[in-house]
Image: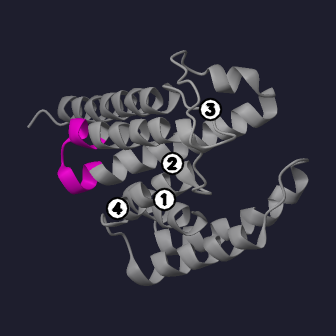
């Protein structure tokens, strides 16, 4: 998961024209030790290893849109782990953000920001493959909906409509930002 997140971060830095992106991704590794200052957030050895591996792979491999498929796979693994299904299903919650509202605000904000990164990056990476925003939003939302439905049989999970809706909102927001940027470029270059 950390490896894929760092690969995506490198892709985002490269697309944002942070030059040189390879240097920026390596410098970003210095932020990992800063997590020791967050009271309930200590970096695990897996996060360290994943971040380092992701940064190194990005430096060697460069920006590749195929990372989108890794991102889809990571969403499925993260959503269904530890893959210990029960015979009885939990109810599906149709109230958006109910799970966030029932957790402590510190944990809820951290989970929300993490999901915004993962879902937004997935949509953006898929859009680079398909060239269509609606396809990347539809695919990401469909995968998230399938995960939520499967979570009905996973203990300790809250199957709800929030994640697919969050992906749709993020997709619309990313599309609006892109359209705004294109409109601004068109207006500033009348030729």
The image quadrant that residue 138 belongs to is: top left
What secondary structure is the stretch in magenta mostly built from? helix
Rate crowding at label 4 as few (under 14), some (14 to 19) or many (20 or more) other CA atoms within 10 Å: some
Read off the residue under disc 2.
118
Distance from the alpha carbon under mark 2 to that under mark 1 = 9 Å
Contact? badges 4 and 1 (CB < 8 Å): no
132 magenta-colored = yes
The numbered mark, 3 or 2, whose residue comes first in the sequence reads: 2
Numbered mark located on residue 69 in the image: 4
> Which class describes the residues within 10 Å of circle 1: few (<14), some (14-19), or many (20+)?
some
The x and y percentages for residue 111 are: 67, 39
Where is mark 3, residue-wise? 158
Marks 3 and 1, Cα distance to the nearest angstrom? 19 Å
**Of callouts 4 and 2, which one flags the residue occurring earlier in the amino acid sequence?**
4
Q: x%, y% of residue 164?
A: 43, 32
Disc marking residue 74: 1
Q: What stretch is highlighted in magenta?
A: 127-136
């Amino acid at each position: 998961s950390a490896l894929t997140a760092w690969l995506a971060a490198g892709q985002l830095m490269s697309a944002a024209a942070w030059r040189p992106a390879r240097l920026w991704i390596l410098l970003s590794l210095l932020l990992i030790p800063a997590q020791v200052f967050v009271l309930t957030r200590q970096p695990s050895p897996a996060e360290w290893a994943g971040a380092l591996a992701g940064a190194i792979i990005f430096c060697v491999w460069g920006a590749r849109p195929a990372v989108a498929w890794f991102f889809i796979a990571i969403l499925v693994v993260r959503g269904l782990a530890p893959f210990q299904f029960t015979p009885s299903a939990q109810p599906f919650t149709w109230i958006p953000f109910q799970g966030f509202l029932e957790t402590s605000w510190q944990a809820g904000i951290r989970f929300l920001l993490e999901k915004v990164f993962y879902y937004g990056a997935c949509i953006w990476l898929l859009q680079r493959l398909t060239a269509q925003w609606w396809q990347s939003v539809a695919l990401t939302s469909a995968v998230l909906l399938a995960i939520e439905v499967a979570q009905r049989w996973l203990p300790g999970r809250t199957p709800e409509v929030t994640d697919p809706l969050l992906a749709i909102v993020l997709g619309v927001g990313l599309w609006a930002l892109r359209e705004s940027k294109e409109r601004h470029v068109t207006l500033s270059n009348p030729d």
